Amino acid sequence: MVRDIIPWRRKRDDGKLIRRNREEDNPFLALHREMNQLFDDFFGSLESGLAWPQGGALRNRSDAWSLNVDVSEDDNEVRVVADVPGMDEKDIDVELSENLLTIKGEKRQERDEKKADYHIVERSYGSFQRSIPLPGGMEQDKAKARFKNGVLTVTVPRSPNAKASRKQIPIARE
């Protein structure tokens, strides 16, 4: 009881005092330390001066902005949908080379708000690049990209030979 709150204990073989390892005695302290580390890694420390981009998303230290994509395919085409909110199509570059689709761009935001008792100026810049490997048998010269309301959609049709060469393989139960 009282010994549990004392941070020192005697070693049995030589009698020297050693500091007690609290994490051995209390698993809640280890959990507390791990949760603190998790939050520090996720939010960053206050001293690092990380900015909070608008929209509530967290900024990563390594890259200022990342690109979220959805990739789907059917018998006729492969479709890649990328969310690029707050951007214009002139800020985005789409390339298709040797069945590798690359989407890259640069996002710039600036906010200048002036009121009677305060003045806020915020700027954020960030570039992104995402490469998505596509399956073989695609008609790269017929690829199309559309941009509407902050969503980029790239469609690449399959070649007729690729459609015909697909074969469904039955699964046998053992």
Image: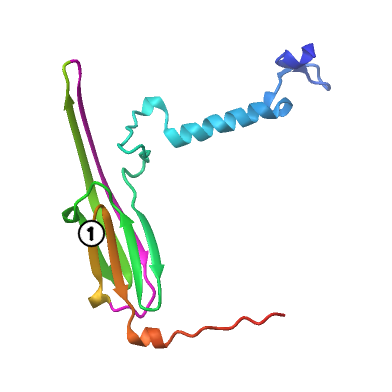
Colour scheme in use: rainbow
Residue 98 visible in image: no
Left or right for 120, reference 45: left
Residue 102 x/y as whole percent: 29, 62
Residue 116 x/y as whole percent: 16, 16
Secondary structure of the magenta portion, mostly? strand
Instruction: Between residue 39 and residue 15, name the one nearer to us.
Output: 39
Residue 164 visible in image: yes
Above or below — where is 62 with respect to 96?
Answer: above
At x 58%, y 33%, the residue is: 34
Left or right for 19, reference 71: right
Q: Is residue 110 magenta?
A: no
Give the residue at the far right of this rendering.
13
Give the residue at the far top of this rendering.
2
Above or below — where is 31 with respect to 84?
Answer: above
At x 32%, y 32%, the residue is: 51
Residue span colored magenta: 117-139
Above or below — where is 139 with respect to 119?
Answer: below
Residue 56 x/y as whole percent: 36, 37
Q: Amino acid at mark 1?
A: Phe
Residue occupied by mark 1 = 147
Q: Is residue 127 magenta?
A: yes
Are there few (<14), some (14-19), or many (20+) residues within 10 Å of tag 1? some
Instruction: Between residue 51 and residue 147, name the one nearer to us.
Output: 147
Name the image quarter holding residue 62.
top left
